[in-house]
Image (cartoon, grey):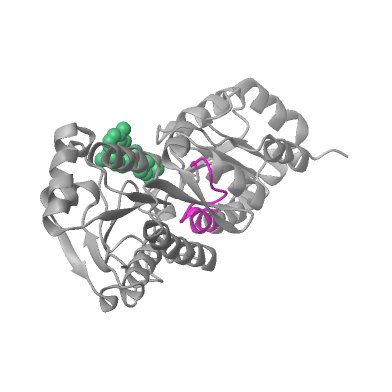
């Protein structure tokens, strides 16, 4: 006999474009497969306070194209405590929700794994974060859209940089990961990229700027990953400016605009596939996994593994920036 499942879904951590498409897919796929669907509001906070609502197919109509998350998101301090997770589990049991889909980043998955371990609640994680810093998946939902947003902005900055021969330091998001910065830098033809994974060497950067191209003739772009310290780009630009008072240096911080906006086709399709695969995994009795994208296929990775291991930047792409921005005669 097929046991009817009650599947809860929540979004947690930073919002990312495509989260709504994932929520829609989880809800519709649950109902399609004869399960009940529940939306949990404000991440793990909603689990703790019981801010949970039965969802029907029409509750997720007309959201696939919207950025943000209709379920809201939060960073919940209380869920990091055992007592908080016990409250959350009790609320789930009260309603009879027997499995959970968590859309978020690695912090959210660490919480999901504990909930599963301590209270035996099956969880499936869907990687939804603009940072793309999750081990076991080539792409996270929202990353592609966020990179495109950064590219669009930098293309505009390049026009003014070139008109005035200014050297721009452009800060992009990514917390302690440089994936957005690296991809954006390649796609915008930036002169250099500074990522948290590689120690910043101002002297080397200065030498490169001075020897390999001339910002006084054509301006230039250095893409900087925020590196968990928003605004640090001002410090870096100041240091370069001290050594090169002849450069016209400017800073642009792209900030939260990178999080918002309509998800592109890649993120919508990825979210739709992962939402459906999450429900299938729960129906197949998976207990503690994350979904990933590997060679265009949706794959399953144990939560344990994805939390423990770190995804690394491709060193060949870092090298590519130097090769392609060097202007030799
Ligand atoms: P993003 O990468 O977009 O910031 P994230 O999921 O990594 O997303 P976090 O703020 O790290 O974002 O985590 C989201 C929430 O997950 C936290 O607010 C907390 O409630 C829960 N969480 C994170 N780490 C743990 C942990 N070690 N134990 C229990 N819960 C955790």
Residue 147's place in the image compared with 311, above or below, is: below
Q: Residue 163: image x %, image y %?
A: 63, 53
Whether residue 146 appears in magenta in the rendering, the answer is: yes
Q: Residue at coordinates 67% horizontally, 37% vertically from top-left?
A: 318
Q: Residue 44: image x %, image y %?
A: 23, 47
Q: Residue 168: image x %, image y %?
A: 56, 42
Q: Is residue 126 left or right of residue 316?
A: left
Q: Quadrant of residue 240?
A: top right
Q: Quadrant of the N terminus?
A: bottom left
Image quarter for ligand 1: top left
Whether residue 108 appears in magenta in the rendering, the answer is: no
Q: Nearer the viewer, residue 280 or 232?
A: 280
Q: Residue 305: image x %, image y %?
A: 47, 36
Q: Is residue 165 left or right of residue 137?
A: right
Q: Is residue 96 left or right of residue 272?
A: left
Q: Quadrant of residue 204?
A: top right
Q: Nearer the viewer, residue 91 or 177?
A: 91
Q: Nearer the viewer, residue 306 or 138?
A: 306
Q: Quadrant of the C terminus?
A: top right
Residue furthest to the front in view is 1
Number of numbered markers: 0
Q: Which residues are magenta?
A: 133-150
Q: Residue at coordinates 43% horizontally, 66% vertically from top-left?
A: 262
Q: Quadrant of residue 253?
A: top left
């Amino acid at each position: 006999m097929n046991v009817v499942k009650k599947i809860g879904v929540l979004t947690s951590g930073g919002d990312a474009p495509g989260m709504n498409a994932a929520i829609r897919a989880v809800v519709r796929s649950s109902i399609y497969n004869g399960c009940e669907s529940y939306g949990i509001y404000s991440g793990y906070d909603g689990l703790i306070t019981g801010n949970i609502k039965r969802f029907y197919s029409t509750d997720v109509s007309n959201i696939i194209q919207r950025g943000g998350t209709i379920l809201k998101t939060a960073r919940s301090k209380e869920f990091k405590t055992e007592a908080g997770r016990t409250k959350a589990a009790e609320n789930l049991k009260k309603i009879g929700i027997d499995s959970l889909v968590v859309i978020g980043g690695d912090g959210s998955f660490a919480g999901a794994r504990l909930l599963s371990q301590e209270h035996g609640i099956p969880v499936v994680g869907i990687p939804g974060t603009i940072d793309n810093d999750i081990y076991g998946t080539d792409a996270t939902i929202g990353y592609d859209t966020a990179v495109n947003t950064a590219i669009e902005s930098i293309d505009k900055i390049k026009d003014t940089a070139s008109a005035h021969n200014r050297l721009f330091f452009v800060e992009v998001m990514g917390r302690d990961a440089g994936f957005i910065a690296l991809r954006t830098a390649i796609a915008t033809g930036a002169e250099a990229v500074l990522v948290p994974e590689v120690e910043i060497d101002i002297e080397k950067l200065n030498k490169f700027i001075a020897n390999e191209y001339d910002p006084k003739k054509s301006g230039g772009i250095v893409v900087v990953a925020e590196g968990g310290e928003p605004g640090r780009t001002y410090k870096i630009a100041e240091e370069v400016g001290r050594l090169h008072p002849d450069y016209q240096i400017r800073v642009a911080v792209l900030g939260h605009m990178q999080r918002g906006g309509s998800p592109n086709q890649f993120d919508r399709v990825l979210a739709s596939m992962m939402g459906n695969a999450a429900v299938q995994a729960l129906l197949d009795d998976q207990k503690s996994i994350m979904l990933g994208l590997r060679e265009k296929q949706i794959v399953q990775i144990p939560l344990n593994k994805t939390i423990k291991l770190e995804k690394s930047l491709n060193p060949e792409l870092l090298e590519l920036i130097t090769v392609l921005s060097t202007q030799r005669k």
